[in-house]
Image (spheres, rainbow, N blue to C red):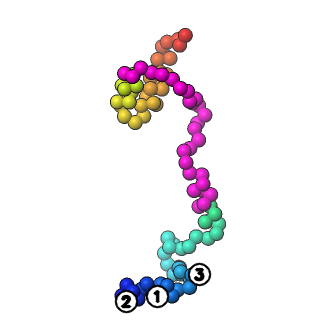
C-alpha cells in the first residue's frame, strides 16, 4: 500500500474503532476505566515529596568563603554543611 492508501484506510475507520486489541500482547491492551482513573490519580500526586518533618527552613548568612568551600564539593553541599555543624555540636556548646 502507498502512504496515501494507508492514510485513506485509517480515515475510513470509525472513530469508536480506532484500535482493536488482538489479545496477544498485554502491553498493547487498552486500559480499563479503573486503570485509567488510578493512573490519573497517581499523576496528580507527582511533585516534590513531603519532607521528613525533622528539618526547619531558615534564612541565615554565611561568609562567602565558607559557602564556596562547601559548594565546591558539588551536589549535596547543604547536607554536608548540616553534617559538619552536627559534628561541631558534639564537641562544642552553641552558647
The range drawn in magenta is 39-65
Tell me what residue is drawn at x 53 percent, y 13 percent: 94
Query: Can you say whether 76 is above or below 87 in the image?
Result: below
Residues packed near mark 2 inside 10 Å, few (<14), some (14 to 19) or many (20 plus): few
Residue 44 percent location from the top left of the image: 60, 54
**How many numbered dots are placed on residues in this image?**
3
Q: Mark 2 — residue?
A: 1
Tell me what residue is drawn at x 45 percent, y 30 percent: 78
Which mark is first along the chain, 3 or 2? 2
Q: Are marks 2 and 1 in contact (CB under 8 Å)?
A: yes
State whether the magenta stretch is mostly helix, strand or loop: loop
Distance (Cα) linking label 2 and label 3: 24 Å
Which mark is first along the chain, 1 or 2? 2
Distance (Cα) linking label 3 and label 1: 15 Å
Helix, strand or loop for disc 1: helix
Q: Mark 3 — residue?
A: 16
Helix, strand or loop for disc 2: loop
Residue 48 is covered by the magenta coloring: yes
Q: Mark 1 — residue?
A: 9
Position of residue 42 in the picture relative to residue 91 (left or right) = right
Distance (Cα) linking label 2 and label 1: 10 Å
Residues packed near mark 3 inside 10 Å, few (<14), some (14 to 19) or many (20 plus): few
Q: Quadrant for the C terminus, please.
A: top right
Q: Nearer the viewer, residue 68 or 35?
A: 68
Residue 87 is covered by the magenta coloring: no
Position of residue 46 in the picture relative to residue 84 (left or right) = right
Residue 88 percent location from the top left of the image: 46, 17
Amino acid at each position: 500500500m502507498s502512504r496515501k492508501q494507508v492514510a485513506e484506510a485509517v480515515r475510513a475507520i470509525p472513530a469508536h474503532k480506532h484500535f482493536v486489541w488482538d489479545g496477544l500482547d498485554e502491553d498493547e491492551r487498552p486500559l480499563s476505566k479503573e486503570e485509567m482513573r488510578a493512573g490519573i490519580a497517581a499523576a496528580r500526586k507527582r511533585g516534590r515529596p513531603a519532607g521528613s518533618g525533622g528539618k526547619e527552613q531558615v534564612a541565615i548568612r554565611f561568609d562567602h568563603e565558607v559557602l564556596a568551600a562547601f559548594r565546591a564539593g558539588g551536589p549535596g553541599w547543604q547536607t554536608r554543611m548540616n553534617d559538619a555543624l552536627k559534628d561541631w555540636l558534639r564537641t562544642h556548646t552553641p552558647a
